[in-house]
Every structure is written in C-alpha cells, then in structure tokens.
C-alpha cells in the first residue's frame, strides 16, 4: 500500500470515529428525554441502534449506582435506636469482639475522611484543594474514648485501625490491643536494630517522607542507623511488627465472633481477607455490624448496617450498656510518657508543631491548603494517589 492509500485510509478511520462519537451524542440526547417527548424519527433511530442504546443505558445505570453509593444516608431516630439495641445485645453476648476503625471516627477531631462529601479523595477528584489543619491540636474523639472504655470493660478484645493519626494510642488503648495497620504518624523506627527500636515523638515524623521514601532524617540513639516512618502508602506492603501489629490483628480475627466496623468505607480493608473469617463455614463466620453513612462493599454480608455518625451511635450504645465514658484529658495523654526526646542537634530536623499538654496554647485557625498537584504530604499518606495497598495476609 502506497503512502497516498495509507493517508486516505487514516482519514477514513478518523471520519468514522467522529461519526460514531456524534451518533453516541445524538442517541444520548434522545435517551435523556422522557419516552413521551421523543419524536417518531427519534424512536426509529433508537430502534436502529439497539446495541448502542443498551451500552449507553448500562453506563447510565453504573453512574447512578456510583452516585447512590457516594450519598450519605442517616437513619431516623427510632430506626437508629432499634439498631443500636440490637448492636448492644451483640456486644454483650460476644466472646471475642473486634473493632475495625476508619477515618470516619476522626472527623469529629477536624481530621478529614477520604470518601465522604468533603473527604480527601472526593475533593481531589473534583480538582479542589485539601485543608490539612493543625494535627497537633487534634484530640481523641468521643468514639475513641468509648472504644478504650469498652476494652477496659473487657467487651472489646482488639482494635484494627486504618488511621495514621495516633488517636487510638492517645485515648489510652493498650498497644498490644491495637493494630495500626497503616502506621502511626508519631512513630519512627530503627530497622537496623534487632528487635526494631521504636521512637514515639510529639510531632508528625512524616515531614520528609513519601511513597517508597521513608527515612525521616534522624538516626537511632543506640546504633546510629537511619530512622524511618511507619506509614504504609498505597502500593506498599507493611512489614514492621509495630505499630502495624499484623500478628495481633490476624490472631484476633481468627477468634472473633463479632466484628464492629466504625467509620470505614471498607474499600481497602476488604482486601485483607484474613480479617473477615470467610474461610470458616457460613455458620461459624463472625457476625458483622457496620456503622457508616455511605455504602460499603461488605453491606450485603452485614448482620446489621447502621447509617449513623460514629459519635452518635457510640453514645447510644454506651448508654444502653450503662458504661461511663472518660473525658479525654490532654495533660494525661499517654503519648507524653511514651515520647522519646530528640538528641541535642536534632531540634532543627523538623518544623512540625509539637503536641503540648497545656491547654492554654495559642491555637491558629490558619489551615494550609494543598492543590491536587501539590497533594503528596501530611498524615493521610504522601504519594498515595496511585496504586493500592497490598494485603499483608
């Protein structure tokens, strides 16, 4: 085939593609009309392109399904109370209750979630900026304190958290009862020491870290090795024994007879198959209770789906269980007793604001914003807009 023939064929393909696009647009405009408003010619055109009509209709249904899944649904007062009564009975009767938490339990601390109407991913997908806030001012929420109280009462055996904000640790929940499977923004680790040496700090240690780049710029006080953060980004596989504590998470999941999911879309957590007991027979699988305003991929398997805000649901639950909830006291925050001070000369190794016990600290309402192009830092994981977290188990 000569050059002229190839060019003619290429032009013909371009024309055909443009005709096909125009035909799709024309059919789509007709489908947007109510059937009674379509002219005889339009109805005839739809009949002539049955396959295209079916394809466009399937696309419309997919868009509508996604739109419905993103909507937040709130149960009415009576329905919510009835569901919480059932949840309370499950908590009382559970031999091994495990709680899985997501970003939704921290929104009351002014920390954004991911997939809510004002979530990180939602705003970035719309091309809008993300307000990071001042995380040194964040405190454990009512839900965090309720979970710690349930554990103290012996009603909760283990907590698996996807959050990196360290608020479970600061609520007083014991380390051995917690698995922070995506890391903790206040913990840096020396992997040269055996066993690994952990350093809890009073500031966000992720200032200089990113996807596949975890060195914090500080060194181990014992061996001099480089310290790294504990964050697990999308596309990475977490290997640290602490604070991830996968051993504890898997052990708890194997024994669990009730799982309570709070404030998580479960779109990531569902990939960790070892957490759901699906390898058991259907009669021996743990009962699943989900508290979330939006759809989750585990809804169909749930014993009960509660559409409510975590703090509200937990308040009703604790009232029904007749348990008092301790108020968070920043001066008694466990992080102050765990924190390792910086060595002389390391003071300039970060610019993040310190967590301080005094409640009289000046607080700033200034919140830096990140554009979608600049997004790549902060507690929610730098460089995590691509790929997916790989399951540990």
Image: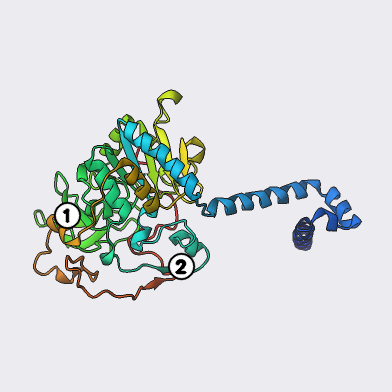
Taking the spot 33% from the left edge, 52% from the top edge, the residue there is 163
Between residue 84 and residue 343, name the one nearer to us: 84
For residue 334, the mark is 1
Residue 127 at x, y = what percent? 51, 67
The residues bearing labels 2 and 1 have C-alpha atoms spaced at a distance of 35 Å
| Discs 2/1, front | 1
Determine the residue located farthest toward the right in the rendered image: 40
Between residue 210 and residue 241, name the one nearer to us: 241
For disc 2, the marked residue is 372
Residue 273 at x, y = what percent? 40, 36
Q: How many marks?
A: 2
Q: Is residue 244 visible?
A: no
Residue 260 at x, y = what percent? 38, 40
Taking the spot 78% from the left edge, 58% from the top edge, the residue there is 33
Q: Is 68 left or right of 88, judged from the image as shown?
A: right
Q: Secondary structure at mark 2?
A: loop
Task: Identify the image quadrant of the N terminus.
Answer: bottom right
Q: Secondary structure at mark 1?
A: helix
Residue 204 at x, y = what percent? 25, 63
């Amino acid at each position: 085939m000569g050059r002229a023939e190839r060019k003619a064929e290429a032009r013909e393909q371009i024309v055909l593609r443009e005709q096909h696009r125009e035909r799709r647009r024309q059919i789509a405009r007709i489908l947007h009309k109510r059937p009674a408003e379509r002219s005889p010619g339009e109805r005839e055109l739809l009949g002539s392109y049955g396959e295209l009509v079916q394809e466009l209709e399937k696309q419309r249904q997919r868009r509508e399904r996604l739109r419905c899944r993103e909507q937040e649904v709130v149960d009415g007062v009576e329905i919510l109370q009835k569901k919480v009564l059932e949840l309370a009975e499950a908590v009382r009767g559970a031999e091994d209750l495990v709680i899985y938490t997501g970003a939704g339990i921290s929104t009351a601390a002014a920390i954004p979630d991911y997939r809510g109407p004002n979530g990180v991913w939602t705003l970035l997908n719309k091309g809008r900026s993300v307000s990071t806030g001042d995380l040194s001012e964040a405190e454990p929420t009512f839900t965090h304190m309720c979970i710690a109280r349930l554990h103290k009462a012996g009603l909760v055996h283990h907590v698996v958290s996807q959050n990196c904000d360290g608020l479970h640790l600061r609520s007083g929940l014991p380390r051995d009862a917690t698995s922070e499977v995506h890391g903790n923004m206040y913990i840096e680790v020396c992997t040269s020491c055996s066993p690994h040496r952990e350093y809890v700090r009073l500031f966000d240690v992720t200032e200089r870290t990113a996807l596949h780049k975890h060195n914090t710029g500080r060194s181990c006080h014992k061996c001099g090795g480089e310290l790294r953060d504990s964050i697990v980004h999308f596309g990475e596989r977490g290997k640290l024994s602490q604070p991830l504590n996968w051993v504890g998470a898997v052990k708890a999941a194997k024994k669990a007879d009730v799982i309570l999911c709070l404030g998580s879309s479960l779109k990531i957590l569902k990939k960790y198959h070892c957490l759901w007991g699906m390898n058991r027979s259907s009669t021996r699988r743990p009962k699943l209770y989900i508290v979330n305003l939006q759809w989750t991929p585990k809804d169909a398997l749930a014993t009960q789906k509660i559409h409510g805000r975590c703090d509200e649901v937990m308040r009703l639950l604790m009232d029904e269980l007749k348990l008092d909830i301790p108020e968070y006291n920043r001066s008694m925050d466990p992080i102050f007793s765990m924190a390792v001070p910086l060595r002389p000369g390391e003071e300039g190794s970060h610019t993040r604001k310190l967590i301080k016990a005094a409640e009289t600290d000046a607080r700033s309402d200034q919140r830096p914003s990140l554009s979608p192009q600049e997004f790549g830092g902060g507690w929610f994981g730098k460089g995590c807009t691509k790929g997916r977290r790989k399951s540990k188990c």
